[in-house]
Image: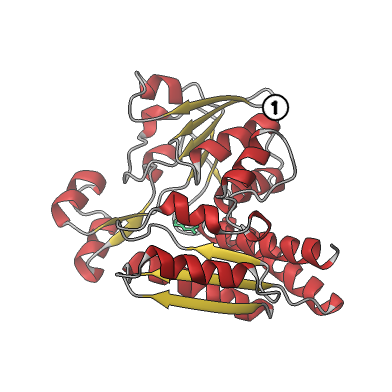
Amino acid sequence: MAGILDGKAFSKKILENIKEKCEKEGLKPGLAVILVGDDPASSVYVRMKEKRCKELGFVSKGYKLPADTKEEELASLIEKLNNDDEIDGILLQLPLPSHLNSKKMLELISPEKDVDGFHPVNAGKLFTGQDAFIPCTPRGIIELLKEYKIEMEGKNAVVIGRSNIVGKPMAILLLNENATVTICHSRTKDLKEVASQADILIASIGRPYFVSGDFVKEGAVVVDVGVNRVDSIEQGEKLFGKGSEKLKKIKEKGYVLVGDVNYEEAFPKASFITPVPGGVGPLTIAMLMKNTLESHLRRKNR
Ligand code: GUN
């Protein structure tokens, strides 16, 4: 039976420390958040980021641009924020509408204000072991594992998913902790077999309940990055079974949010596991705030 890696409690502690430091030292870090279009999930994330900023006393500037915003318009907003001395961090919420080139837009953000760590300069610095902004979700996972004193050195770590936001930086960070790292993806052969060798298993695929119990080695540490919305009763029956609490939730609320890991199957085998919600999710925002504070300190001391 697994111990719970309580990301919610840990992120609360991190945020309290940030708030205390800012109050004590009279710091006012600034974060700008840009949302293009009205994707409902992105709108929720952006609201949460702005709420955290206010709670911590950060300067928070929110920009909601229409879905048909042109590249030049977004580029000129980014340029303005690059030159805004009150702003230490610029976050461009992804995904962008399809007519906008995300790579090109992310490259316009000054690497010194790139608190998401998505700019190629920061990705390259991370890759070559230099000081850099580290993407928030993988950074949060490493800090969570350290908080629970989970040994990484010499362990087999398997990352499922190869995104620039989570999978790739996660693998580098685990490598920096001296884990033996394998990255799996949609073309991996015998994925289940590879995953079941993991002492530390990170699931970041975006498919509800994809990681079943037989992916999980007895005693493994399981980290579930997925947040998947299941809103069909038919799919709910298949994934969770008739008469399950989750199916009941779909019928009551219209949907349920679940991770990439089949929690009920993984829980009895794992030594530690992150729940969804309340595991990795809250840590992403806590790390965004931490990156913004660190950016502020760096820029002030320049
Ligand atoms: N979309 C999903 N996750 C993220 C994130 O961490 N940062 C940004 N900017 N967009 C996202």
Q: Write down the residue under mark 1.
A: 178
Rendered location of residue 6, percent (x, y): 58, 55
On the question of residue 217 being in view, the answer is: no
> From the viewer's perspective, is residue 209 above or below residue 89?
above
In front here: 290 or 104? 104
Please indicate whether residue 300 sits to the left or right of residue 87 in the image. Answer: right
Q: Which residue shows up at 29% across the image and 70% down it?
A: 68
> From the viewer's perspective, is residue 125 above or below residue 190?
below
Please indicate whether residue 172 sits to the left or right of residue 146 in the image. Answer: left
In front here: 143 or 83? 83
Please indicate whether residue 218 sits to the left or right of residue 70 in the image. Answer: right
In front here: 35 or 25? 35
> From the viewer's perspective, is residue 74 above or below residue 199?
below
Inspect the image, locate mark 1, and give the three-letter code of the amino acid beneath it.
Asn
**Image quarter of residue 16:** bottom right
**Image quarter of residue 36:** bottom left
Which quadrant would the C terminus be assigned to in this image? bottom right
Dot 1 falls on a residue whose secondary structure is loop
In front here: 137 or 196? 137
Q: Which residue shows up at 37% across the image and 23% down it?
A: 191
On the question of residue 124 being in view, the answer is: yes
Rendered location of residue 3, percent (x, y): 57, 45
